[in-house]
Amino acid sequence: MSPQRHPNIDTAVRYHQAVSGFATGEELRAFFHPDATHHELPNALFPDGNIRDLAGLCAAAEAGRKGLGAQSFEVLNALAVGDQVALEVLWTGTTAVPVGDVPAGHTLHAHIAVFLEFRDGKIIAQRNYDCYERLTPA
């Protein structure tokens, strides 16, 4: 008999699958508590980081849909304790438009640690540590 997976891990994986498909609007909101916050720590694309509420998170998803031609999230590892989930994720995205010195059509890779806190089965807080590989073509 295989062990049962924590329900919040299942939600976290489904959320990343939805984002891979450029989920926006109600499809994206369905994963979040209305009071949710997203804290993106400083990284190569956002040197000052970002803190977003749910509306800001949805706006960022819309912007991502316009700036990327494709993206995928591969969940490599997941741990859950109580209402918290930690994920190790490999993100791959292909630019649809130039991003700084990065031309359209360039594939980006990031190694991501994601920490999610749940309330009532919904994500109430998300913290991302995004480690991008070299942004410019070699």
Image: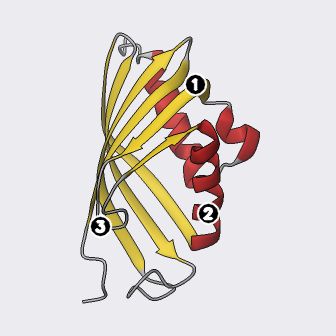
Q: Position of residue 45 (x, y in %)?
A: 36, 67
User: Mark 2 — residue?
Assistant: 63
Q: Give the residue type at disc 3.
A: Ala
4 lies left or right of 44: right
Measured in 3D between alpha carbons, the distance from the residue under mark 2 to the one under mark 3, in whole angstroms, is: 17 Å
* Amino acid type, label 2: Ala
Q: Is residue 44 above or below residue 124?
A: below
Q: Mark 1–mark 2 contact, CB under 8 Å?
A: no
Residue named by callout 3? 44
Frontmost of labels 3 and 1 is: 1
Residue drawn 66% across the image and 58% down it: 62
Q: Is residue 96 above or below residue 89?
A: below
How did the renderer colour the structure?
secondary structure
- Position in image of residue 8 (x %, y %): 46, 20
Residue toward you, 89 or 66 = 66
Residue 54 location, x and y as percent? 60, 37
Quadrant (top left/top right/bottom left/bottom right) for the N terminus: top left
> From the viewer's perspective, is the residue at label 1 or at label 2 nearer?
1
